[in-house]
Amino acid sequence: MLSNERKNLYPLLLDLVAVPSVSATEGEKAAARLVFDRLAELPYFAGHREDLRLLPVEGDALGRSNVWALVRAEPPTARTVLLMGHMDVVDVDAYGPLRDRAFDAEGLTRALAGRELAPSVRADLDSGDYLFGRGTMDMKCGLALEMGLLAEAAADRGRFPVNVAFLAVFDEENGSAGMRGAIAHLARLQEEGLDFVAAVDTEPSDLGGGERPSRNLFLGTVGKIMPFFLCAGKAAHVGTCYDGISADLIASCLNLELEGNVDLADGARGERFTPPVCLMERDLRRTYSVTVSERALAYYNVLTVTRTPREVLDLMVASARRALSTALDRHSASARAFFALRGETWPAPDWSPDVLTVADLIGKLGFDAARSILEERLASLPSGGDEREASIALAEALLDASGLPGPLVVVGFLPCYYPHRGNGRSTAKERRLLSAARKVRERARKEFGEEIRLVEYFSGICDLSYFGFDGDAAALEALAANTPGWGRVYDLPLAALASLDMPIVNFGPSGKDAHKTTERLELSFSLERAPRLLETLLDGLGSATIDE
């Protein structure tokens, strides 16, 4: 016999998955409408229409909206738990001939029965406890769980000792435009008197595979920042290559300096995260030429749990200085050796190598001149293009206008930025969240025989990053000052972000193979045990006492 939770949640899950809400498509608008319409069916919102809203994000090219809902507790209180999650999913191209069934969870699950599958996937399929399909795990089930909790609060306003808020956002799998657009809304509600005691995301509690999924409750989330390096060499014909220096050589030395450099791996509370990883390295010439390259680009994925943008920038500038020095030394050694082979002495060029930030470059040009250059270049860029490519084009325009000769490196940041968020145990809210998490772990063990691990940081990038800032707000200024096109190409309301004051937690359904063609949801845990454990979490977050 199915539990009441499963009877209610399973049809909703199927309906949510059926909407092809791939990031940056019209499907995200359809998903928002479905979520809104389902919540509008709750009798509570018939009498509280102001507490259920579609929230358009200003300037969004597709006209997408987030969904906001709030159930006010009885007796009245300002204390509020925010449930949040994303409506979008990654694309389904990898499904090949089954792509048309990727959003039909039951149909895809049946279709896979006749396919050749890896043994572990076959075992899960044959168990009958897994539902396949795009978004089943990441994260339509999480949304269904949150909507179920909201419905529970709406049916009995005394059920939880806190208001229950709900925020469903678009674009999490892409650039987090939905969540970034919601920050100012949350900050206003906070100013108007809502006291957000915590933000709860229901991303899958297990992001890996294995014979048995692990059950994790995350108390924070890792941050991500993307420094870029615009390398300028000195042009020369390949026949007289030592008259110049290759920008590709500089970029290569930079990659040797940064890629996998464990000295640059950030960590906290006994956890360490991966060092910088190069996401792009390329020559910037547009046509074939028999010359050494004059411009090259590299940018990196850098994870943070303690470092601010200012601290990362300082580390990257120092790395660029070492890389530029290494490139020049290698170039000089090669030149001297080659000329010696010919019985000659290399006439060393009189270069003035330099490393400067985007802010330095703007300072050399003057703010007004730099703004004019950026506006002119922006006007020539296609609308709706990739934010990173637009920022790179702007950095090139600034360097062109400066007339600064190579060899040099310009260091800055590209979209998107995700601040890290951790539980420092330094505030009553953080300690209450930790206490609530322990109650979830205790109930899971005693009632369900499940072992829940409390983990300090969610290692997958997620929108929980945007519920506050760990550190001095002034540390964010380096981000804005060194991101080309800040406020036009990419924006983040820094003052509103820094004003938010809510600890975060991630705990949700369980499954395997997020973003893969074998993405699947573990039904028994996700639809029967997870809802009860989330109730325990909300009860603990609303508790007047804190169990140390």
Image (cartoon, rainbow, N blue to C red):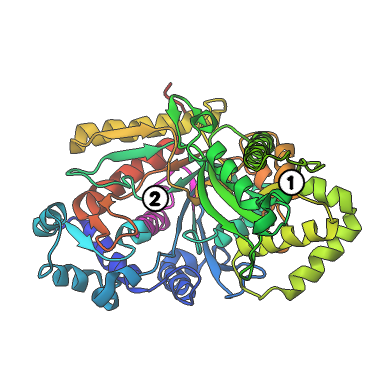
Q: Is residue 143 magenta?
A: yes
Compared across the picture, whether 395 is left or right of 453 comes to right
Compared across the picture, whether 387 is left or right of 424 comes to right
Query: Quadrant location of residue 416?
Result: bottom right
296 to 58, vertically: above or below: above
**Circles 1 and 2 in contact, beta carbons < 8 Å:** no
- Amino acid type, callout 2: Thr
Characterize the local packing of mark 1: few (<14), some (14-19) or many (20 or more) Cα atoms within 10 angstroms. many
The residue to which callout 2 is attached is 202
How far across and how far down the image is residue 408, in percent?
74, 46
Q: What is the secondary structure assignment of the residue under circle 2?
A: loop
Decide if residue 303 is in sight here: no
Relative depth, front residue between 2 and 396: 396
480 to 178, vertically: above or below: above
Residue at the extreme front: 343
Which is nearer the N-term, disc 1 or disc 2? 2
Quarter of the C terminus within the rendering: top left
In space, the residues marked 1 and 2 are separated at their CA atoms by: 46 Å
Decide if residue 136 is in sight here: yes
Residue range highlighted in magenta: 142-165
Compared across the picture, whether 381 is left or right of 138 comes to right
How far across and how far down the image is residue 409, in percent?
71, 46
Q: Nearer the viewer, mark 1 or mark 2?
A: 1
Q: Is residue 501 magenta?
A: no
The residue to which callout 1 is attached is 408
Query: Quadrant location of residue 286?
Result: bottom right
- Amino acid type, callout 1: Leu
The residue at 81%/45% (across/down) is: 360
Relative depth, front residue between 26 and 518: 518
Residue at the extreme top: 548
